[in-house]
Structures are given as structure tokens and as C-alpha cells.
Image (spheres, grey):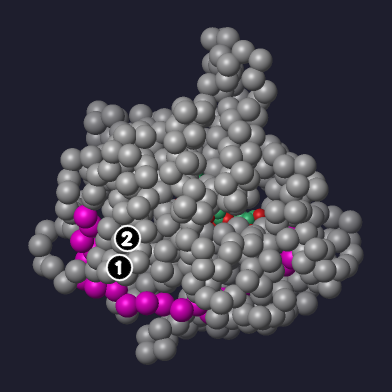
Amino acid sequence: MCRHQHDAAVARLRAALVALPQDSPVRLSKPSSNLFRFGGRDRAGGLPTDGLDTVIDIDADARTAEVGGLITYEKLVAATLPHKLMPAVVPQLKTITLGGAVAGLGIESTSFRAGLPHETVLEMDVLTASAGLETVRPGDALFDGMPNSYGTLGYAVRLKISLEPVGRAVEVEHRRFDDPAACFAAMEEIWAAGEVDFLDGVVFGPDEMYLSLGRFSDSHDPTSDYTGQSVYYKSLRHRRRDLLSVHDYLWRWDTDWFWCSAAFGVQNPLVRRVWPKNLRRSDVYRRLVALDRRLGLTRRVDALRGARHEAVIQDVEIPISSAARFLERFCVDVPIRPIWLCPLGLRGEHEWPLYPLRRGEHYVNFGFWATAPLGPGQSPDYHNRLVEDLVDRLGGHKSLYSTVHYDREDFWRRYGGQAYQELKDRYDAQRRLPDLFEKVGTDSETR
Ligand SMILES: Cc1cc2nc3c(=O)[nH]c(=O)nc-3n(C[C@H](O)[C@H](O)[C@H](O)COP(=O)(O)OP(=O)(O)OC[C@H]3O[C@@H](n4cnc5c(N)ncnc54)[C@H](O)[C@@H]3O)c2cc1C
């Protein structure tokens, strides 16, 4: 469709990188982000990325899409749905980009059968620190090292991904459980039966949790709309069945940033009525959080009240055999609800050295995104460290989009230190791009 535009954008990016003094920090200038590190203030500069968010080609027969690395999933889905196709894994937040979901990992309710977004990639062009352009495929060291590299090995500027067919709508069935063991046993059964297209869940408390089973449907019945006055996550508690258009199912969590929009009053019916519909989006709420962090408003209110809070914004993966233990312990130690559940497993035979999930293992992703009050004498990272210890003891992993509290040695033991250093020596010998530990282990927004 617009390959020449894409090529011109890549040429601009390469030229800017070549022109950048060797000792200047290298970062992409991106219009949006879903990282949860707000410490750095230096948002100026950055390499130009305009034109890297286009659809280059959709091959409906081969079920593939070729796109620029900075395309958002919102734009990608809008381009594939008219062909009755969707990317095999569509992360829930509209402004997550394909390149970001590969370099920073992503997940969704198809991940129990389709794996993670990087497993849907067939080929990509990576701009390396020396301004070289490498076309890499599964099995190439750079390709396999990109997931969880967070822009420290190079930038994915073009990707070719596989797509899958969709139905007219998605029929969702919500099943309630009142104890974690029963919930995860049912999850395993549903997984093994292989009869659903989508599977995720929400925990409201250790005695109230729901699994949501989604199936493509050709029904012409009316569909629900959760972009208006109703809020999707609340519907789980009172509806047993629901029908959503495929578009609305894919973005069901974006309108209210799962449930985090409550912090801005958007779920209050009076506020919701006047809050413009086009501003009920995860990127709007994230920008409000960034503004609050920059101005220190919540911090000042806390100080006036003599209170302290810790942001505990994390996604962790736990083997399903230990998922009930994780949830029970978490519910005792961390006063954060709801919690999102999403089953996942590696789809293929491939290994990904920087995020080494075990082949054949079934995992559950737990997502929790809120603040927890700190008691007297508790360190500012008390709950985060508690979660990191628990994840460790149960053989799990933690995503790196938010704060990280490991020391250097611990970090590299978990995230493929040796493979990473080999890739760094090969593709960034001058160390122009930041080191992964330095980048994610500090509270910095520099990307
Ligand atoms: C509250 C919250 C909930 C979340 N929930 C989910 C979820 O449910 N599902 C899910 O999948 N993810 C979720 N995420 C995580 C999100 O997917 C990751 O943070 C992802 O990396 C964001 O991608 P982005 O495109 O916004 O990239 P950014 O946030 O801009 O960047 C992420 C990192 O990737 C690097 N990067 C960006 N683009 C490229 C590129 N083209 N090539 C190489 N490196 C690049 C950047 O340098 C940066 O280090 C959540 C995050 C938050 C804060």
C-alpha cells in the first residue's frame, strides 16, 4: 500500500541516527507509551519516527500483514478487520505498538493458544545501533533476542505477522468461582478442551473470581456497548452471557483501562455522562497519571494527610500449578483488587533467551495496577519486593514495563544475561544504546 512511504521513513530514521553524535543518548521519539516508569524528565529530542506506523501490505489469502514497527494495534486492527482477519494476539491497550509489544512483551486472551505477540512475527527489519538494517527471522540470534530487549538491541522498524480469521461477533460466557484452586483447575480443563477462542478472568477477591470464555459467533443478536454508560468489568458480576462485536471485544479493556479509570471518577455515572466519549481511552488516563507524577499532586496530598502509598503496577507469570498459592498469598499481603488473569503458554518450539518461559509449561499472568498503603517502617518498595520474592519462589517471571527492584546479578540470572551480552557485543559493540538493566532497573522514562 505505501511501501515507498515506509522506506522513506526508515531512511529518515537512519540518517538521524548517523548524524547523532556518538556520545548522545539514542531514543525513539514516540507519540505514546505504555511504560510505567515516570522518573526521567528529558522528553526532548529523540529519533524521528513519523511514517513508521503505516500498513505496508495485507495479504488476505496468506493471512499476513506487513507493517511499520510503530503502528498501534488500534490502527492495525482497523486495517485487518475489514478483511475479517485480526492479529493472532491483540494486546488490550489501543496505543500499544507492534514494535513495543515485541520489544516489551504483550499478552491477551488468545495467548493460551497463540502465545505472545512476538510468536506471531514471521520476519522483521531491525535498525541496529550502527544504523545497519538487519532483516531477521525466527532462529536468527537477533530475532530471538528482541523480545524483552526494550529497544536496547535495536529498533523493529518493519514486521510481517500472521493473522487469523474472525467471526461476526464474540460470545462471552462468565463463570464464577469462589476459591482459587477451583478457578485454576477449571482454567486447565478449558485449556485442555480447546473449545474456546479467548480466555481471561478477573479476581474481585479470594472468594469471588470469574473466568470469561469467548467464542467467535455468527449471531445477529444485538451486541453490548461498553464504551457508553456501562462498564465492562462490572458486567462480569451480573451477566452470565454477553455478545460483543469483534472490535468491541478486542478493546473491551481499553475504555476504562481495565478498571483503573475509577481513579479519575469516570465510572461515577454523573462524571461519565459528561466525560467525552472520545476521551474514555487508556492513553488519556495514562497521560493524566504522568501529569500527576510530574506535578507531584498525589504525593503532596499524601504528605498533608501523613499517609504513604506505593505504586504496585505489575504483570507477573506464574506456572498454573502454583497459581492458586500465588493468589492466596497475594490476597493476604497486597491490598489490591481487582486482579486480571490471563493464561499463556509458548506457542511454538522456539526459545526466547531474554524472557525464558519454559516450553510446554502453562502459565497464568496476574495483572495488578494500583497503589497500596504503606505501614509505619515499611520501605517505599515493600509490596513490590514482596511480589518479586513470591514470583521467584513459585518459579515465575515478571514483565519489565514497570518498576524493577532486583540487583544487577539477580536481574541477569533471570533475563538471559549471557545471551544478552553476546548480542550486545555483536550488534552494539560501541554501547550506543542503553544497557537493559540500566534502562529498566532505574525509574527512568528515557527510551
Ligand atoms: C497498566 C498497564 C497494563 C498493561 N497491560 C497490558 C496488557 O494487558 N497486555 C499487554 O500486552 N501489555 C500490557 N501492558 C504492557 C505493554 O504491553 C508494554 O509496556 C509494551 O511494551 C508497551 O508498548 P508500547 O508500544 O506502548 O511501547 P513503549 O511503552 O513506548 O515502549 C516500551 C519499550 O519498548 C521499546 N520499543 C518501543 N518500540 C520499539 C520498537 N519498534 N523496536 C524496539 N523497541 C521498541 C521502547 O524503547 C521501550 O523500552 C500494560 C502496561 C501497563 C502500564
Q: The disc labelled 2 sits on which kind of residue?
A: Glu
Secondary structure of residue under mark 1? helix
Q: Is residue 276 visible?
A: no
What residue is shown at x 73% (from left), y 61% (from top)? 416
Residue at figure coordinates x 62%, y 40% from the top left: 388
Most distant residue in the left direction: 221
* Residue 374 point in image, percent of width and height: 57, 20
In the depicted structure, whether residue 183 falls above or below residue 107? above
Q: CA distance from mark 1 to mark 2?
A: 6 Å
Is residue 155 covered in magenta? Answer: yes
Q: Quadrant of residue 214?
A: bottom left
Question: Residue reaching furthest bottom?
Answer: 61
Name the residue located 58 percent from the left edge and 16 percent from the top edge.
375
The x, y position of residue 246, in whole percent, is 27, 64
Q: Amino acid at mark 1?
A: Ala
The dot on residue 189 is 2
Q: Position of residue 268 (x, y in %)?
A: 28, 29
Q: Work out whether 306 lies above or below 206.
A: above
Judging depth in this view, the residue of 252 and 66 nearest the camera is 252
Q: Badge 1 local density, few (<14 within 10 Å), some, or many (20+)? A: few
Quadrant containing ligand 1: bottom right
Q: Secondary structure at mark 2?
A: helix
The span picked out in magenta is: 152-173
Marks 1 and 2 in Cβ contact (< 8 Å)? yes
Looking at the rendered structure, which numbered label has been put on residue 193? 1
